[in-house]
Image (cartoon, grey):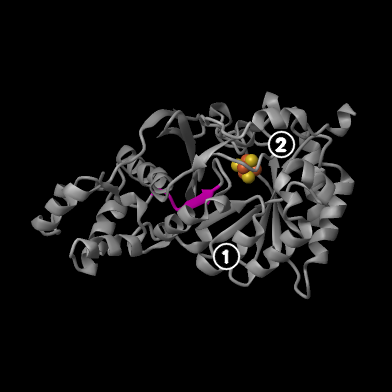
């Protein structure tokens, strides 16, 4: 079996090339051909010695994931469903904006965290993606879009690890992928433009701060432990106090001077004025001597039947945002993109051969909105 070179960051590819008896700089050349120029055919890599190209053909390949479907939204958002084998498929979404192009990347086939408001969580968990499968999403999207748009310069300027899966529960595969995104010989993305979104895997947040401190977004969704336990089950293991302290520690290494808190607005569940007040108190409690240290991104929920939850009315979202803003907390309301192709936040579902019986368990433990009590 030959090795997929998308599995390596530059250090890994260097070790691989040295194992073939090649000099280190050859790995850099190869890395640039793959990631900067989108080459998969070794014969295209004309500045590599013919002998190396022949060696590579016998031992390695550069292979994207098979595309099952591609949908393009009326707003330009593109969603791909990639086959990762054994009946599993993962999704990636490209979101074009005037000043940036963002790719939302999946890290797992399914997710074991089981957040109540998340389509992926309801599907359960099958397996972690490899580094190559994570990178294949970016590699394919970047070079397919360049060809389609007839452009030579970079299209994807931002990556958010917010697709299917909890990236920090797939840490070993995640970190080399992040390093490839940041590497000047790879995609050369700034650390500020690569975001890992986590539901709060505290020990891994601390490790990420040391190993590859990119921007951090935390799926908060509730201002107190009892409510968060019901919405984000991982909170029972790493409750709010531990999570907030870890966020504060991360800030010392983060490329930005704030942590983003994602907050999905659920009708009658977490969108009341008292929830906003509790959030304000929480932010102040962990502010230390500093002032602003976080910002909030309020996300209009994208309802799906199995969740039993509804989207908060627009005026309630506005009032909630105003309370936070009036307290001096930077708050934005996320625009919904790709709604017509189910590519909006929390809607990524792919196909998951669940090994965890998550759907059954979640149906038993539904969160009941106040409005239905
Ligand atoms: S929100 Fe994220 S961590 Fe929670 S179930 Fe969905 S993919 Fe997993």
Question: Where in the image, quadrant-wise, is ligand 1 located?
Answer: top right
Question: Pointer 2: what residue?
Answer: 116
Asked if residue 68 is positioned above or below residue 103 in the image, the reply reads above
Left or right placement of residue 151 versus residue 195 in this view:
left
Question: Within 10 Å of the Cα at label 2, are there few (<14), some (14-19), or many (20+) other Cα atoms?
Answer: many
Point out the image quarter for the C terminus. top right
Outermost residue, left side:
50
Residue depth check, mark 1 versus mark 2: number of the one nearer the observer: 1
User: Does label 1 or label 2 sit earlier along the sequence?
Assistant: 2
Q: From the top left corner, tell me how far across and down residue 178 is, in percent.
A: 46, 57
Outermost residue, bottom side:
289
Q: Determine whether the residue tagged by mark 1 lies in a helix, strand or loop.
A: helix
Left or right placement of residue 161 versus residue 27 in this view:
right
Left or right placement of residue 24 versus residue 219 in this view:
left
Q: Is residue 313 magenta?
A: no
**Residue at x-position 60% and y-position 60%:** 204
Left or right placement of residue 182 versus residue 144 in this view:
right
Q: From the top left corner, tell me how far across and down residue 231 is, in percent.
A: 75, 41
Question: Pointer 1: what residue?
Answer: 207
**Residue at x-position 49% and y-position 36%:** 91
Q: Give the CA distance from mark 1 to mark 2.
A: 27 Å
Point out the image quarter for the N terminus. top left
Decide which of 185, 242 is in the foreground and name it.
Answer: 242
Decide which of 79, 324 is in the foreground and name it.
Answer: 79
Are the residues tagged 1 and 2 within 8 Å (C-beta)? Answer: no
Q: What span is in magenta? A: 155-161
Asked if residue 18 is positioned above or below residue 84 in the image, the reply reads below
Q: Is residue 159 magenta?
A: yes
Decide which of 172, 189 is in the foreground and name it.
Answer: 172
Q: Determine whether the residue tagged by mark 2 lies in a helix, strand or loop.
A: loop
Quadrant in the picture for residue 150: top left
Quadrant in the picture for residue 346: top right
């Amino acid at each position: 079996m030959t090795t997929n070179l998308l599995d390596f960051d530059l250090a890994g590819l260097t070790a691989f090339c040295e194992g073939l008896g090649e000099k280190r700089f050859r790995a850099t050349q190869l890395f640039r051909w793959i990631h900067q120029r989108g080459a998969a055919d070794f014969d295209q890599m004309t500045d590599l010695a013919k002998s190396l190209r022949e060696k590579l053909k016998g031992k390695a390949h550069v292979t994207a994931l098979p595309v099952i479907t591609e949908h393009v939204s009326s707003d330009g958002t593109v969603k791909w469903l990639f086959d990762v084998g054994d009946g599993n498929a993962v999704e990636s979404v490209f979101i074009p904006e005037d000043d940036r192009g963002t790719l939302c990347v999946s890290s797992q086939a399914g997710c074991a965290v089981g957040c109540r408001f998340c389509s992926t969580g309801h599907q359960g968990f099958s397996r972690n993606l490899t580094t190559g499968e994570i990178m294949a999403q970016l590699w394919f999207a970047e070079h397919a879009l360049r060809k389609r748009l007839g452009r030579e310069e970079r299209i994807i300027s931002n990556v958010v690890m917010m697709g299917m899966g909890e990236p920090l529960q797939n840490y070993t595969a995640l970190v080399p992928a992040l390093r490839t995104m940041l590497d000047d010989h790879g995609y050369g993305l700034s650390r500020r433009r690569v975001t890992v979104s986590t539901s709060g895997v505290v020990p891994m947040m601390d490790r990420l701060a040391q190993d590859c401190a990119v921007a951090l977004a935390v799926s908060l969704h509730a201002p107190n432990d009892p409510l968060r336990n019901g919405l984000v089950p991982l909170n029972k293991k790493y409750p709010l106090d531990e999570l907030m302290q870890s966020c504060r520690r991360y800030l010392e290494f983060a490329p930005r001077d704030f942590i983003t808190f994602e907050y999905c607005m659920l009708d009658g569940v977490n969108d009341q004025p008292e929830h906003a007040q509790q959030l304000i108190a929480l932010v102040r409690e962990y502010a230390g001597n500093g002032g602003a240290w976080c910002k909030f991104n309020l996300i209009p929920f994208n309802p799906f039947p199995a969740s039993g939850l509804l989207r908060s009315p627009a005026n309630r979202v506005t009032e909630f945002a105003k309370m936070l803003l009036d307290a001096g907390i930077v708050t934005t309301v996320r625009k919904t993109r790709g709604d017509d192709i189910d590519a909006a936040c929390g809607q990524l579902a792919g196909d998951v051969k669940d090994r965890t019986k998550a759907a059954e368990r979640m149906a038993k433990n539904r969160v009941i909105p106040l409005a239905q009590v």
